[in-house]
Amino acid sequence: MALENAARLMSRVRTRDAAAFESLYDAYHRLVYGVAFRIVGDVAVAEDVTQTVFLKLWSAPERFDGGNFGGWIARVARNQALDVVRRKSHSETELSEAMPDSDLLEERVFSEIDAAQVRRAIAQLPAEQREPIELGFFGGITHAEIARRTGIPLGTIKTRIRTGLGKLRSALEGMVAV
Amino acid sequence: MNGHDAMLDDVAVYALGALPPEQARAVSEHLASCKECAAEYRRLKPAVDAVAYSAEACPDAATGAVVPSPRLKTRIMDEVRRSAPARLSNVGEMRAVRPIVWPAYAVAAACLAVALITTAFNISLNEAVRSSKAQIAQLGSQAKILHREVAVQSTELADLTSTDSQHYAVEDGEVVRHGNRLYIAMDSMHMPPRGKVYQAWIMRSGASRMTPSVTFMPDRTGIAVIHVPVQASRVVELAVSMEPEGGSKQPTSKPTFIVKLT
């Protein structure tokens, strides 16, 4: 869904327009569910996370304050899913902080996203860069924990994350609104 | 690598959401005062959003990808519509307006207004046609979703009526196991009070306690046919209880029923 449409629908959701909410659900539920399932690994729990995310969107639409709606709702889904994992887990693993729902900095935004194209771009990253990025995002663990698990020095992990994200950014250049 | 290069690496890890809380706060404060790091953050953030998009569930269940149940939308929309304000739809509900007698000199102005309104109406009509076309496209998309839902329901109907299925009677319904699929089929379930839902609980073979499963609501007539997403052959006991919306990790009320699947 084009960014402009999502923003327009969100302004209608703020006026309690259920039809606008339904259109947003149709456009973004697979993204929310996909992120949740990748993190929790369970169909029922992923559906519960999806339900929680969308009902929060309905009850507090003002939490979205503009920008890339897809990126925003994906972060909300990630935080919600990691919260579920944290509550269930009592391990000593060092967990990262929840990502901010909104950014103070102006954010460059995606006009259209094609998930298959994104998957191809990520698959083309070297494994040494792809793995820490996926572990950090979907695993919800810190860079130090990634370094501990992989046995790679912390500084190297940080550089690989930055290099990998930079490559991904370049590969997706055509998908970003200029 | 100098100290600021190291900070740029930290900015990348911050954008990914993989810093511990204390360091994340430090980077966040630094971004407010360092243009170079702020620019790097803006450059990398869309790449992180792209990582999220890579997990988007495939819309085509035929590929074997996991997709959310169509019933999830029903559950969410039921809740949304319950809390949405009613819209004024009946003309009879509108406040009566006192009739106005127009003075003669206003008639000419009214004629001009009618002409303008007619023009505007034509423009509005064109917009309505465009809007209708968009709605037709949207209905086509909804039809595809309904088609998939019908396919799912056909499978369920076949499972529920198959002579090979095992039926376990419970109050107001039954639990049905067909192969590796498990269903709760209720025919006269009470609607839970506002803020509450029903939740299924399952006991797997060899487990010492029940684990939470799907939450659900009956329809207005008390009917609920729920597919429990579990490998049915491994389930030895199933229960249903009333829980707060969103479900619980532990049962918080006396079960509506418990049934052994042996």
Image (cartoon, coloured by chain):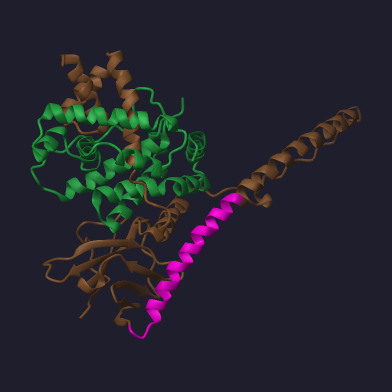
Chain colours: A green, B brown
Q: How many marks?
A: 0
Q: x and y percent of residue A37 in the render?
A: 29, 51
Q: Position of residue B25 (x, y in %)?
A: 21, 25
Image: magenta residue range: B137-164
Q: Position of residue B86 (x, y in %)?
A: 54, 50
Q: Along the line of sight, which residue is nearer the eye, A38 or B27?
A: A38
Q: Residue furthest bottom?
A: B163
Comparing B6 with A4, the one in front is B6
The residue depicted at 41 percent of the width and 30 percent of the height is A65
Residue B25 seen: yes
Q: Is residue B23 above or below residue A135?
A: above
Residue B120 in the magenta stretch? The answer is no
Left or right: A72 in relation to A12: left
Query: Where B165 falls versus B247 (above or below)?
Result: below
Left or right relative to B98: residue A81: left
B160 over B107 or under it: above or below: below
In front: A130, or B217?
Answer: A130
Given residues B217 and B124, the one toward you in this image is: B124
Q: Residue at x 90, y 27 (%)?
A: B105
Write the residue at 31% across / 46% down. A35
Q: Is residue B144 magenta?
A: yes
Determine the main secondary structure of the stretch shown in magenta: helix
Residue B181 quadrant: bottom left
B233 displayed left or right of B151: left
Q: Position of residue B242 (x, y in %)?
A: 29, 63
The quarter of the image holding the N terminus of chain B is top left
Q: Quadrant of the C terminus of chain B?
A: bottom left
Q: Is residue B14 visible?
A: no
